[in-house]
Structure formats: C-alpha cells, structure tokens
Amino acid sequence: MILERAVFGPLVAHLAASFASLPLVPTLGQVALVTGGLLALAALATALVARRVLHEPVVAGLREE
C-alpha cells in the first residue's frame, strides 16, 4: 500500500499526464456539429409533440380534470 502511493502512483500519474493533453478550446467544426445536433433534436421533439397534439381530439383535453 505504501509502495503503491509513494512510488507507483506518481510514476503512473506522470506517464498518464503525457497521454492526456487535450485541447480545452473546441474547434469551429466541433461547435457546428454540436449545434447542428441540438437543432436536429429540437426539431424532432417539436415534430413529435405537434404530431401528438394534432392527433388528439380537443374535447379529450377539455374533459380531463
């Protein structure tokens, strides 16, 4: 346990740090991809709700208490 914390922990953390250098700023393509995906999901959700609303009779909504 002591050997793990004193020797292997820092050694493995140092080795892993060199592999984990990720940029923190997204590229324009990544921003466009996420924005497009969110717009597509919003359009799909809107279409599903509109379809459901149009298929339900108005009287059914008025009768519910």
Image (tube, helix red, strand yellow):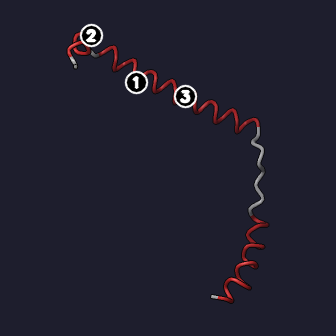
Find disc 1 in the rendering and name its residue: 48
Front in this rendered view, residue 45 or 6: 6
Q: Mark 1 or mark 2, which has the lower sequence index?
A: 1
The residue shown at (76%, 67%) is: 17
Front in this rendered view, residue 63 or 8: 63
- Between the C-alphas of marks 3 and 2, the distance is 29 Å
Amino acid type assigned to the residue bearing label 2 in the image = Val
Q: Is residue 58 found left or right of 42 in the rendered image?
A: left
Per the image, label 3 sits on a secondary structure element best described as helix
Q: Are marks 1 and 3 in contact (CB under 8 Å)?
A: no
Q: Mark 1 or mark 3, which has the lower sequence index?
A: 3
Residue at the far front: name it. 65
Q: Is residue 4 found left or right of 55 in the rendered image?
A: right
Amino acid type assigned to the residue bearing label 1 in the image = Leu
Find disc 3 in the rendering and name its residue: 40
- Between the C-alphas of marks 1 and 3, the distance is 12 Å
Mark 3 or 2, which is nearer the eye?
A: 2
Q: Is residue 62 found left or right of 5 in the rendered image?
A: left
Mark 1 or 2, which is nearer the eye?
A: 2
Res. 34 image quadrant: top right
Q: In the figure, 34 relative to 43: above or below? A: below
Quadrant containing the N terminus is bottom right
Measured as percent of width and height from the top left, residue 52 is found at 34, 20
Residue at the far left: name it. 63
Amino acid type assigned to the residue bearing label 3 in the image = Ala
Find disc 2 in the rendering and name its residue: 58
The residue shown at (24%, 12%) is: 62
The residue shown at (73%, 85%) is: 6
